[in-house]
Image: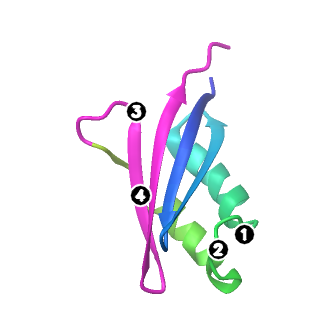
Amino acid sequence: MNALYTILCNYRGGTYIGQARAAKPAMALQRWVTSAIGKGVIPIPADKRSAVGEALVRESLVHVRDCANVWCTTALCSSDLILVNIVRTHESTE
């Protein structure tokens, strides 16, 4: 069953929010990377998008301590930190 995940990304002073349905948080992150980073929704230079997306997906998600259904991951774009939080916001009832 696919749950709804909300993805929050902080990059260079901006906050970018999206959602994806997936069976697992890592799959939701992959879908979000394809849509948000791959299509330039987040202002990452075009020549770095692929490497940043791959770095985010490659890293293991870290469960945020004392929080239910919340994970995070990071990547660098040049020297700028990209912080991504993934929150399972709704369980599928299908």
Q: Badge 1 is on which residue?
A: 40
Q: Badge 3 is on which residue?
A: 69
Report whether 43 appears left or right of 55.
right
Q: Which amino acid does label 3 sit on?
A: Asn
Q: Contact (CB < 8 A) between labels 4 and 2?
A: no
In the rendering, at what x and y percent does residue 92 appear? 61, 20
Q: Contact (CB < 8 A) between labels 2 and 1?
A: yes
Please identify the quarter of the rendering in which residue 6 is found: top right
Q: First in sequence: mark 3 or mark 1?
A: 1
Element marked by disc 1? loop
Report the quarter where the N terminus lies. Answer: top right
Please identify the quarter of the rendering in which residue 94 is found: top right
**Real-space CA distance between mark 2 and mark 1, rounded to the nearest whole angstrom:** 6 Å
Q: Contact (CB < 8 A) between labels 3 and 1?
A: no
**Within 10 angstroms of label 1, few (less than 14), some, or many (20 or more) residues?**
some
Report whether 48 appears left or right of 70.
right
Q: What residue type is labelled 1?
A: Gly
Residue 67 part of the magenta segment: yes
**Real-space CA distance between mark 3 and mark 1, rounded to the nearest whole angstrom:** 27 Å
Task: Name the mark on residue 73.
Answer: 4
Q: What residue type is labelled 4?
A: Thr
Q: Nearer the viewer, mark 4 or mark 2?
A: 2
Q: First in sequence: mark 2 or mark 3?
A: 2
